[in-house]
Amino acid sequence: MAGRCGTQVLVVLLAVALAACGPSTAGGATPGAATADGASGRADDRLAGDLVVLAAASLTDALQEIGARFERDHPDVTVRLSFASSSQLAVQIGEGAPADVFVSAGPRPMERVADAGLLAGRPMRFAGNALTIAVEPGNPLGITGLGDLERRDVVVVLAAPDVPAGELAADVVAAAGLSLRPASLERDVRAALARVELGEADAAIVYETDVRAAEGAVDGVAIPVARNRGHRYTAAVVAGAANADAAAAFLEHLRSRDVQDRLRDLGFALP
Amino acid sequence: MTRRAGASHGDRAVAAATGALAVGAVLLLVLPLVGLLLRIPWSRIPEVVRDPAVLPALRLSLTTSLLALTIAVALGLPLAWVFARLEFPGKALLRALAVLPMVLPPVVAGVALLLAFGRRGLVGAPLDALAGVRLPFSTAGVVVAEAFVAMPFLVVTVESGLRLLDRRLDDAAATLGAGRWTTLRRVTLPLLGPSLASGMALCWARALGEFGATITFAGNLPGRTQTTPLAVYLLLETSPEAAYLLSLVLLALSLAVLVALRGRFLGVR
């Protein structure tokens, strides 16, 4: 009996260990040692410490790159990124999540946080995005546009309506006079994309940059500009940020020439 | 004299430490529930209940969890009997695999279900091609996900119960002329009652509360696959009060299960 109890405890411990997971970090650059050029007279106001950034899921790949770049510029800073739908992040900040920067896709989540008095400054626009239809590589069902998403043989998924991407998709669909029957309303735009990547869905309405970031795992079917909608990404420093200096610098970084060029390369629209 | 005083001093220290840790445990477990109760908009419940996400989620959860329970009993009882009464090569491994969903992180369970029953899955692909049956994004998929994570609870509880039964009663029934089916029906199952009831209660509660496997495998669509835990997760973003209310309902149901079990956990009397 004791032997069986012991085994069960071991199994539970293993399960707990497996279930534990940490937040995603960018680059993982270790904070640098003391400045080598101690010869310069002026006190160096180097940025240091952790910088916690809560960002929209659609920025996963872009911000991981941009965060790593920021760490190279500021070796004493470790950028800690956490991605989820902007609406989910707004809830987290409202519940007191310790964040320095909030990056939202779309105005509503940012407004919610601002209305709750949780921003330490005004939101800043730094990029934009537009929607597209993600389909399986090779487009086996021959989807050519939004209208095809109404077909009964097409399994389509969207992001949930209070997620910025889902809200936009609903607008675009309604404006086109269509009524879709989505199989699922996913909790963020990347989850919707994943359904197509996994082959569970035939099509998903996601951002153009999501299709690019998928690097061939999905193909994109464009939505004509006249029918398309886009969001503008905004970033702001969160009230009570532990690392307000680094947060402000990060916002500057987002609008720097290099980063803006890189965002354009990745498919984002510029403000 | 000195030795006795030393022993009682040590005893008191241990008792104090145990007491303090126990209080800590109670606080850890109870405070979140108190926190939830304090946030419920008690006076506005009739209004909050009318949020379009609330009642469909509750109805769906009740339906799917009861169906999952039925499957768990239909398949789990025989399996528990096999584990309790038979010996065969590979039994230990099989038993470990059968119990695995109980400790598997739910999202992992969801991924595993996709790989098996998804559109490109091991079983799912032929199912789709031959019978046009698609489990993901369907209510049936929710039932499968819930049964997958909850059945082991029933199996383990009932197996323990079976092991504790006195086989001699079965033998006595046989000497009195009862066939195997009659023995099962009139001797084994009635004696198994309490374990079976505990197992069913735990199984149902687990099925009701499932989130990770359901959202990964079956997706989220109000009325079809948006069970109560999924609704709570998403409602937090738009109507937190509805989320708190649904949480309260789940909390009350879980509490009812525990009270009904009255301490009979996992087959241990």
Image (spheres, helix red, strand yellow):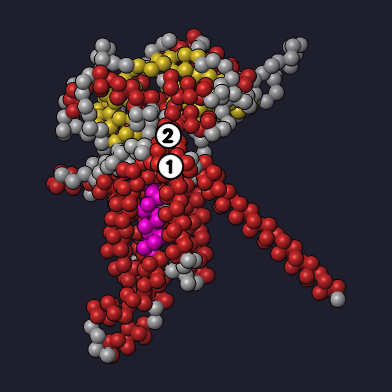
Q: Is residue B17 magenta?
A: no
The secondary structure that dominates the magenta segment is helix
Q: Where does residue A205 sit, x and y in percent of width and height?
A: 29, 26
Asked whether the residues under marks 1 and 2 belong to the same chain, the reply is yes
- Give the labeled residue for mark 1: B45
- Give the labeled residue for mark 2: B239
Q: Judge whether B77 appears above or below A161 on screen.
A: below
- Residue furthest to the bottom in view is B175
Q: Where does residue A23 sit, x and y in percent of width and height?
A: 51, 35
Q: Is residue B209 magenta?
A: yes
Density class for disc 1 (Cα within 10 Å; few <14, some 14-19, many ≥20) is few
Quarter of the figure with residue B201: bottom left
Q: Nearer the viewer, residue B90 or A154?
A: A154
Residue flagged by tag 2: what amino acid is it?
Ser
Pinpoint the chain carrying mark 2.
Answer: B
* Highlighted magenta segment, given as a residue range: B199-219
Q: CA distance from mark 1 to mark 2?
A: 13 Å
Q: Residue at x 40, y 56 (%)?
A: B205
- Residue furthest to the left in view is B130
Q: Is residue A54 left or right of residue A220?
A: right
> Which quadrant holds the N terminus of chain B?
bottom right
Q: Residue at x 30, y 23 (%)?
A: A169
Q: Is residue A16 left or right of residue A267?
A: right
Pinpoint the chain carrying mark 1.
Answer: B
Q: Is residue B89 left or right of residue A71?
A: left
Q: Where does residue A269 sit, x and y in percent of width and height?
A: 38, 13
Q: Residue at x 25, y 18 (%)?
A: A175
Which comes sooner in the sequence, label 1 or label 2?
A: 1
